[in-house]
Image (tube, helix red, strand yellow):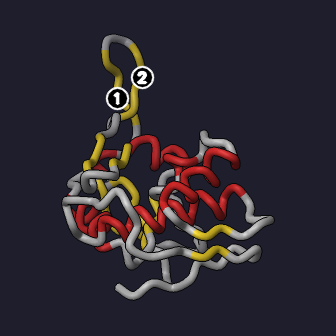
C-alpha cells in the first residue's frame, strides 16, 4: 500500500508577527476522526517535518484531511511509514502497549518492537472505526504482528 501525504497549503505556511512575537501562520486544529480518534494537525505536521503520512486504506482519516482547508495532498516521496495515528501511542511503554493489545484481544508475538506495537494498535483503531461513528470496545478479529513487523492484511 502506498502512503498518502499532506502538507500545509502555501497561504498557511510561514510565520506572522502578533504583538511583537513571531508565531506560525497556522497554529493548528484538532480533527475528530471518529469516536475513538482525534488528530492534532499541528502536532502531526511538526512531528512529520511538515507532512502527515496516512495509510491509503484509512478512508475516514483521508476524507477528513481532504476536507481540511489548510491542507493539500503532496507526494509521499520515499515515505514507507505511516505516521498519522501512531503518535497517540508514542508516550506509552512497551508493557502498556502490550497490555492495550491484550485488552483488545490482539495477538502480539514476542520480540516485536515498540514502533510495531504502536503501528498495530493504530491499524486496529482504523479497523474498528472503518467508517463507523460507533466504535465497538471489543475487537471482532485479531491482528497478528510478526517479529519482522508485518501486519496481517485486512479486508477493506
What residue lies at 44% left-to-right and 76% top-to-bottom? Answer: 141
What residue lies at 51% left-to-right and 64% top-to-bottom? Answer: 105
Give the side of residue 77 with respect to residue 146, left or right.
left
Q: 13 or 121, which lies in front? A: 121
Extreme top residue here? 19
What residue lies at 35% left-to-right and 22% top-to-bottom? Answer: 17
Q: Which mark is residue 16?
A: 1
Q: 143 or 23, which lies in front? A: 143
> Gap between marks 1 and 2, in whole Å?
6 Å
Above or below: residue 154 compared with residue 61: below
Residue 34: image quadrant is bottom left
Q: Where does residue 75 sit, x and y in percent of width and height? A: 46, 73
Q: Residues within 10 Å of mark 1 (few under 14, many from 20)?
A: few
Number of marks in picture: 2
Residue 79: image quadrant is bottom right
What residue lies at 25% left-to-right and 49% top-to-bottom? Answer: 32
Q: Where does residue 101 sit, x and y in percent of width and height? A: 56, 58
Q: Which mark is residue 22?
A: 2
* Tag 1 near tag 2, CB within 8 Å: yes
Q: Mark 1 falls on what kind of element?
A: strand
Amino acid at each position: 500500500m502506498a502512503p498518502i501525504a499532506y502538507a500545509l497549503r502555501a497561504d498557511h505556511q510561514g510565520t506572522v508577527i502578533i504583538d511583537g512575537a513571531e508565531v506560525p501562520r497556522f497554529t493548528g486544529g484538532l480533527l475528530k476522526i471518529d469516536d475513538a480518534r482525534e488528530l492534532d494537525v499541528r502536532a502531526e505536521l511538526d512531528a512529520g517535518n511538515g507532512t502527515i503520512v496516512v495509510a491509503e486504506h484509512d478512508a475516514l482519516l483521508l476524507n477528513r484531511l481532504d476536507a481540511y482547508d489548510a491542507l493539500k495532498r503532496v507526494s509521499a516521496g520515499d515515505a514507507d511509514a505511516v505516521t498519522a495515528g501512531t503518535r497517540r501511542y508514542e508516550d506509552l511503554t512497551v508493557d502498556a502497549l502490550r497490555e492495550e493489545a491484550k485488552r483488545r484481544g490482539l495477538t502480539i508475538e514476542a520480540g516485536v518492537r515498540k514502533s510495531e506495537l504502536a503501528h498495530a494498535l493504530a491499524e486496529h483503531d482504523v479497523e474498528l472505526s472503518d467508517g463507523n461513528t460507533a466504535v465497538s470496545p471489543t475487537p471482532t478479529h485479531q491482528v497478528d504482528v510478526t517479529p519482522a513487523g508485518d501486519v496481517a492484511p485486512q479486508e477493506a
